[in-house]
Amino acid sequence: MIKKALVTGSAVGIGRVIALDLASKGFDVAFHYNKSVEAANQASQEATSYGVKSIALQADVTKPEQAQSLVENAAEKLGGLSVVVNNVGNYLEKRISQTSIEEWHQMLDSNLNSTFYVTQAAIPYLKTAGWGRIINFAFASAQNVIASNIQTAYRVAKTGIIIYTKSLAKELIKDKITANVIAPGVAENSVGLDEKTISLLPNKRPATLKEISNAVVFFITPEADYITGQVLEVAGGMRL
């Protein structure tokens, strides 16, 4: 099998950790960024220390034509594509009655639509590779479809990602391509993280980025060949 991966939003944060983890396991990796060019180049350079090919590519993946070009460039420069991790997605905490039309579209574009654009462009390459992994990101309890006073737009987008991923899993299983969802809870880089939030967590600490990355890497391993269409929470018992 070819080991070629594209991780969106991988200049910094969880995306960076995932991409570097994959590089450490022998994957050629495309680091994607929108504005953080210096950080992306630094991360890509670090990945080469594992003896793999690494590149940094710019795109605004909320634009379908740029998402398409990103995937095409990654596949061309890496010599194929077998793994896609869709990590891009902004966050909004705001009452639905106060959410503007622009904010609503921005949540759908940065989370759900970007995932759709990148994945749709990547599927032909994964089929050509003869096997593939699609990993998308939701958040803890998104699959339970629970209302929220202040996260409605974000939750709608993330729940849509779960439905989309399950549909992919069902359609692509014949092509030896799995599609799964990682659903983190509070992480060490979460927006607005403070001592009060940490005190409410069952483990009294947030997830490390490495712990979230470990779950992503598991879905990519051969041991996960028979697992598809699943949502794996990395939340330390949050919202059980």
Image: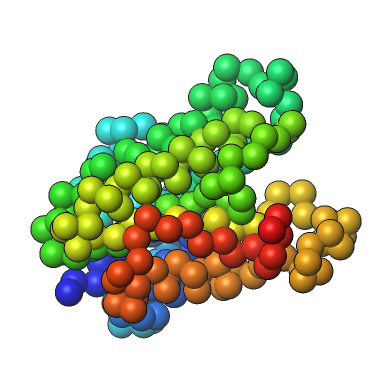
Question: Relative to the observer, which residue lies in front, 203 or 71?
Answer: 203
Q: How is the image coloured?
A: rainbow
Residue at 58% of width from left, 72% of height from top? 211
Residue at 43% of width from left, 58% of height from top? 230
Asked if residue 66 can be seen in this view, the reply is: yes
Q: Position of residue 17 (x, y in %)?
A: 51, 68
Q: Position of residue 4 (x, y in %)?
A: 25, 67
Q: Position of residue 33 (x, y in %)?
A: 43, 50
From what the image shows, is residue 79 above or below residue 60?
below
Question: Relative to the observer, which residue lies in front, 203 or 205?
Answer: 203
Q: Quadrant of residue 13?
A: bottom right
Residue at 58% of width from left, 40% of height from top? 145
Image quarter (top left, top right, bottom left or bottom right) of the C terminus: bottom right
From what the image shows, is residue 202 above or below residue 134?
below
From what the image shows, is residue 75 above or below residue 99?
below
Q: Position of residue 18 (x, y in %)?
A: 46, 67
Image quarter (top left, top right, bottom left or bottom right) of the N terminus: bottom left
Asked if residue 189 can be seen in this view, the reply is: no
Question: Relative to the observer, which residue lies in front, 166 or 26?
Answer: 166
Q: Quadrant of residue 65?
A: top left
Residue 86 horizontal side relative to residue 235, left or right: left
Residue 212 horizontal side relative to residue 67, left or right: right
Q: How many marks?
A: 0
Residue at 54% of width from left, 47% of height from top? 143
Residue 233 horizontal side relative to residue 120, left or right: right
Residue 50 horizontal side relative to residue 126, left or right: right
